[in-house]
């Protein structure tokens, strides 16, 4: 399901929901389509679907007042399915789950808007643009518009040279002599969309699950009780502990104050200042609360 929530209230309530995927809907992105807004959703069924916001609002207005909590029916404007991989015996696997979406504007990747899709098996978008990511999962994506960079969080292992785990080709700035340094626990990579190649890569120390971009640094959260911080050159900065969150899977930044909201397992939401100090939060206790 995809839900639309009210904003500007102390206690937000769901305003509408509709069936978007078979299985969980894992990620959302938005794209301007003329005067309308196209909401893109990625699901566990391997589909990327686009929903016109105008149609959502129209369906909300047409439903009876007594059925305000019922799901509405919305038809997708866009429906793309990731291809299934063929096994060694010719059997087709299940479609790879869509885990992350990032939209690059016109001019960033060859003059046309490009949707990058990260899944548990590969990341794809724009012809052969991310072919080096096909050997590792891409769990979170974020496009940096001013420099035409795509930031990619990957699980499992990483390698800075010889493509041992991070892809078939060496990364720029890889170590020499020893074949590069390697680590387990995931990585953060930076891809140049103009050259269509990975420019930098750094170890994360955990499996990345959420990624956010600030004017001067990159924030990464995942399967660990901390918020990793990197400079825009992917140099590691002191991390921020997340004592209430064993595993974080959602991260957002307030555009004005820079305050951070981190959502994690157990229904925990931590609020941090832009300096990393905890200023509030909520936690789930039971169905009765």
Image (cartoon, grey):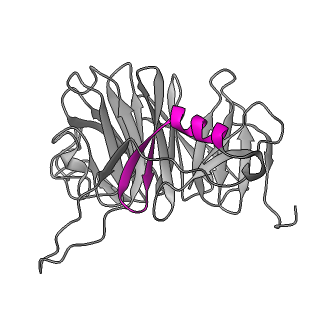
Which quarter shows the C terminus? bottom right
Rendered position, 84 above or below 283: below
Q: Is residue 89 left or right of residue 84?
A: left
Residue 140 shows up from this direction: no
> Which contiguous range is marked in magenta?
40-62
Rendered position, 49 above or below 172: below
Q: Give x and y (percent) for residue 276.
A: 68, 36
Confirm whether the magenta stretch covers residue 41: yes
Residue 23 shows up from this direction: yes
Q: How many marks?
A: 0
Quarter holding residue 245 = bottom right
Residue lying at the far bottom in this picture: please name it.
89
Q: Is residue 45 left or right of residue 67?
A: left
Q: What residue lies at 82% left-to-right and 64% top-to-bottom?
A: 285
Q: Give x and y (percent) for residue 220.
A: 51, 44
Confirm whether the magenta stretch covers residue 241: no
Q: Give x and y (percent) for residue 56.
A: 56, 39
Q: Is residue 86 left or right of residue 203?
A: left
Q: What residue lies at 54% left-to-right and 59% top-to-bottom?
A: 223
Q: What residue lies at 25% left-to-right and 30% top-to-bottom?
A: 193
Q: Nearer the viewer, residue 103 or 282?
A: 103
Which quarter shows the N terminus? bottom right
Q: Is residue 210 left or right of residue 258?
A: left
Q: Nearer the viewer, residue 233 or 87?
A: 87
Q: What residue lies at 65% left-to-right and 50% top-to-bottom?
A: 263
């Amino acid at each position: 399901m995809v839900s639309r929530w009210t904003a500007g209230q102390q206690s937000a309530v769901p305003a509408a929901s509709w069936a978007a995927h078979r299985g969980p809907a894992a990620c959302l992105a938005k794209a301007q389509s003329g005067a309308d807004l196209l909401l893109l959703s990625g699901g566990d069924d391997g589909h990327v679907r686009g929903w016109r916001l105008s149609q959502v609002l129209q369906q909300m207005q047409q439903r009876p007042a007594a059925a305000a909590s019922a799901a509405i029916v919305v038809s997708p404007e866009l429906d793309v399915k990731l291809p299934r991989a063929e096994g060694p015996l010719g059997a087709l696997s299940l479609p790879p789950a869509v885990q992350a979406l990032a939209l690059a504007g016109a001019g960033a990747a060859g003059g046309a808007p490009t949707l990058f899709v990260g899944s548990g098996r590969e990341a794809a978008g724009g012809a052969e643009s991310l072919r080096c990511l096909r050997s590792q999962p891409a769990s979170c994506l974020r496009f940096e518009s001013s420099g035409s960079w795509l930031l990619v969080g990957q699980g499992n292992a990483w390698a800075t040279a010889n493509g041992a785990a991070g892809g078939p080709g060496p990364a720029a700035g890889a170590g020499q002599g020893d074949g590069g340094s390697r680590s387990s626990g995931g990585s953060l990579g930076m891809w140049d969309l103009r050259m269509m190649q990975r420019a930098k890569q750094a170890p994360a120390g955990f499996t990345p699950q959420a990624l956010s971009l600030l004017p001067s640094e990159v924030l990464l959260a995942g399967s660990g009780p901390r918020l990793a911080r990197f400079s825009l050159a992917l140099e590691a900065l002191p991390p921020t502990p997340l004592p209430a969150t064993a595993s974080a899977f959602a991260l957002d930044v307030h555009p004005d104050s820079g305050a951070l909201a981190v959502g994690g397992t157990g229904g925990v939401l931590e609020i941090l200042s832009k300096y990393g100090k905890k200023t509030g939060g909520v936690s789930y206790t039971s169905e009765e609360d």
